[in-house]
Amino acid sequence: MALATPAEEAGAVAAPAPGAHPFWRRLRARRAALVAAAIVALLVLAALAAPLLAGIEGQDPTTYHPDLVDSATGGVPVGSFGGISAEHWLGVEPLTGRDLFARIVYGARVSLGVALAATLLQVVIGVSIGLAAGLGNRFVDQALSRVTDVVVALPVMVTALGALAVVPTGFPRPVLIAVIIGLVGWSGTSKIVRAQTLSLKSRDHVAAARLSGWGPWQIARRELLPALAAPVITYAVLLFPANIVVEAALSFLGVGIKPPTPSWGQMLSDADTWYQAAPTYLLIPALLLFVTVLALTVLGEGVRTALDPRAESRLRIGTGRKKEADA
Amino acid sequence: MSLVEVSDLSVSFGEVRAVDGLSFSLEAGGALGVVGESGSGKSASAYALLGLHRGTGAKVSGSVRVAGVDVTAADDAELRALRGAKAAMVFQDPLSSLDPYYAVGDQIAEVYRVHHRASRRAARARAVEVLDRVGIPDAVRRSRSRPHEFSGGMRQRALIAMALACEPQLLIADEPTTALDVTVQAQILDLLHDLRRETGMGLLLVTHDVGVAAESVDEVLVMQSGRAVERGPVGEVLVAPREPYTRALLAAVPRVTEPRISSGAKPADDGDDGEVLVEAVDVRQVFGRGRTALAAVDGVSLSVRRGETLGVVGESGSGKTTLGRMLVGLLEPTSGRLTRDARVQMVFQDPVSSLNPRRSIGESVADPLRASGERDETAIRARVRDLLTRVGLAPESYDRYPHEFSGGQRQRVGIARALAAEPELIVCDEAVSALDVTTQAQVTALLAELQQELGLALVFIAHDLAVVRQVSDRVAVMRRGRIVEEGSVDQVYGNPRDPYTKQLLAAVPALDPALAVVRRAARKELAAA
Amino acid sequence: MKWFLLRRLGGAVFVLLALSVIVYAAFYVAPGNVAQIACGPRCSPAQVAQVSEQLHLGDPLYVQYGHFLQGLFVGRDYSTGTGVLHCQAPCLGLSYQSDQQVTELILAKLPATASLAVGAFVLWMLLGVGTGLLSVWRRGRLTERVLTWITLAGMATPVFVIGLLLIIILVTALQILPFPDYVPLTEDPEQWAWNLLLPWISLALVSAAPYARMTRASMLETLAEDHVRTFRAYGVGERALVGRHALRGALAPVIALGALDIGSMFGGAVLTESLFGIPGVGRELVDAVKHVDLPVVVGLVLVTGFFVVLANAVADILQAMADRRVVLA
């Protein structure tokens, strides 16, 4: 039955704002998201320029400085605040005396790189499986949905731990961790994509495209994929920080990134035993991890509301329904 | 003192002024219909009577007095005492308007206890009493059901029962039958009519459907763009309107009693010549399997010939949309034979979802051209511009996006896209039902014109019997997946044989209030028979 | 409803079986000498040969899996050279490194994990839902903004970071709480709770954030629904609208999420247990991984999967019971 409420025929319909795409306009209107984006950009830059930054400092992440730790106390850094000085901007690691700043920026490479690779893998697998399930026939859909159910039953942390037990130690750890997280963490994406595809498939413009004579591939490319971009991007931006935490957690447990390769989680794991003697050694990576994940989460929120302006207005009582009220 | 006194009421939502200086009054026991197209501000006015704009960010000015309460000045407690007790409201969509988690009887009892010091048991008894009054069979048992276990009509009855619970002096009904099938609509309108006569409560009926107002009220107020255009006794305003807008509105309303205005390519009486474009023989479409299997179309045979218009009418769930989708090949019949010897296209119901919001309308219209292998960009552009012009849109619209267009314009784009494939048959699935009557009339006229000019055959699927009568040569009436009656338009509408067709036709609201009284009596007779 | 239940449980059983196949295959097709890995680095060739015999590693994979499945459902016998070791159903195999049956080993660790999970669950549900409700109640004011930021911060903090900070503040600096030393509930309920307080708080603080967000979003959405408008139009007060008409619908998804989370937590709150040294399933997993104790790892992954699948089914059923329309759809 006809219930929809079109605007009146003669009535002026909002003209599109000239210039920027509304997405960027809406994103720019959110200050918190902008600040978050700036922080993320800064971190990424620091990670990319790690050798350069360490070079400016004049240090590298692997050289031991036994002279900077006090062997009498078991390896506490000499000097206040974990040995912070003009040569060592963030101090040195207890026991070894390796430069903390260099380890932090090199660690950013590992932490961000692993999480990014894992996220990309999750998205690629999730979108493929979700799209195939949504577009395929009943049998394909059933089969793929069951596979997804099985993957859901494998919690990322536990499965990653299990998998790390059997893979030979020679395999490069960062790659291994990214692959494992990617292989077990795609179920959310595939569920979203499947649901979205099913809902899109029933829209009349897809039916119209079929009547126009397009084949399934062209329909997927023209009518479906562009519409899937928004929910997938939104979800991926939230997957990314979650993956950073998983990598940090695995390294924290001592089964992730192995020394001498630095990663934030692994530094935290070491710091666990040093927090009384050298609190900065714990606080610096903890703070960085917190800021990174928070910035990415806030950015994700911003992207979500900018991509789906209704999400915001829906949550504001009384206004979201107004259009329908005057049916 | 009047029951309702509104003076200089304005309601704005941000920049948009939905109601703009509206004044009217309603005497106790009177019935006023507020009629207008979408965006006329009629619902926003009705909401203002109960102070429902409070806390929504809408700006309300002017004065509103309902049953002695100054709504704009009242504090929250006074307002709550008014709502439901002195003036009660019935909403458009009965499913979403009831709480899905509680039994219907409990919801009514809750409202009763807000306004009366009564025990739970007494409130439940009152709920059963009013449910029984609105015609819910076996009210004691049904009062324990939750809303989704009710049919659409039953839910609207339950909502009316809730309104009756505290014996209000005023009933505000906001599009109470818009979500319902025409036969159910007639029952609800008859119920409101009886209740009003019995209880003497005032009625304020908000509707876009002039026929619904003609059936139910004594006076009408016609609204346009937030202002009152004309007000007077229903017999005067609807029979001899003074204002040009009212006249235009009434002229646009399709009438089930009048034969089609513009004749198509074929005279209505000889439909036997002309080649058959599409023929269906005993087609079925079954959705689901096993216990949940449902035959949406259950053995339908029909044929469409070149240049003719076949109207397909039916209520929701009759299978008419499924049939249309099979005719164009979007669905394969589960069984039966379907032969298609022509290029077919479809115009869809929903002007929002039928165009891809991410592609310009020119690209959408160009789809059939590109899909058929046309590569010459200049030729494509030229052809699309021609088509846009042909359906009454500016050719420069090529690069604009669907959200920049109104519902009627989007339907025109849909028609242009269908024409691009140079079809011999177009299936219009509720193509005008989402539109306001004036827009509806324009789009219907466009379709008729195109048909004549291009010799198109049309299958016109709709729930609105009047619209179908206006455009069709032949009509098929569908019910529960089957065609119950088929014949020439004059025969089916003038001399229906099937009891269901008779029931349908009797349920269509009449525009003439005097006729409405006669038809109401006829409906009662038919129901008693 | 009956059909829905049957279908849902049938699906769960299928997923569990598929899971066991995948996990079994993944671990026992691992490169290298599986018997040597399972037995541990200090095993003599004779011991390795015995393990190989016990796991039927000479047979094709599906036969091995068949024995595994048999152990799971009816129990199985292991020949030890001198006699027969019976492993009762559900038999998850033998841990050669700790010389114990995996099932017994896991069962011994479950109480600690359950203590942690249940206590934290109660805390985080109260905290999360409470925060969500408060921010709806004070919507549009400063309180809401502050709560939103606290919630975001909560989402951004890994449990091991907040746990470490709490240890530094509450245990080392202020010395209000003891460093957890797990005491079973059956031994001393008071010490049990006192020692678990810190892990509970840490876990609750990080887990509550998604619940606060979900409660808030879900409440705002229900409050904007038509049926709430109906009752507002009938003079029902704001308190009853929120408490009776909005909360019921809004809490259904929150409770379903709770069922999911507590389910996966029964498979071990790996990080919390490791950080606070709670002898639970999660810490056992970390130890088993470090020592490459293959049968234990396989058993634990399966047990976790079992709890997750169970929780998924329970969550679905809870939601269907709260909203009967789901069943019809």
Image: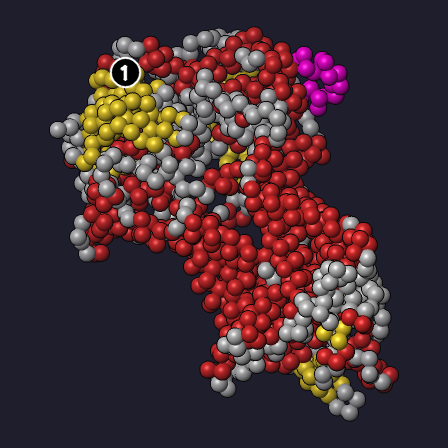
Q: Quadrant of the C terminus of chain B?
A: top left
Residue C110 showing in the rendered view: no
Instruction: Looking at the picture, tell me which residue is in the foreground, C144 or C84.
Output: C144
Helix, strand or loop at label 1? It is strand
Expressed as whole percent of the image width and height from the top left, the position of residue A204 reads 57, 30
In the rendered image of this protein, does residue B170 appear above or below residue B112?
above
Residue B63 showing in the rendered view: yes
Expressed as whole percent of the image width and height from the top left, the position of residue A281 reads 68, 67
* Residue occupying image coordinates x 23% and y 42%: B75
Expressed as whole percent of the image width and height from the top left, the position of residue B415 reads 56, 19
* Residue occupying image coordinates x 56% and y 7%: B453
Q: Is residue B379 magenta?
A: yes
In the image: residue B188, left or right of residue C255: left
Expressed as whole percent of the image width and height from the top left, the position of residue C56 reads 79, 76
Q: Quadrant of the N terminus of chain B?
A: top left
Magenta residues, start to end: B368-383
* Residue occupying image coordinates x 74% and y 21%: B373
Q: Which amino acid type is marked by label 1? A: Glu
The residue most toward the bottom is: C82
Q: Which residue is mark 1?
A: B230
Rendering quarter of residue B186: top left
The residue most toward the right is: C45
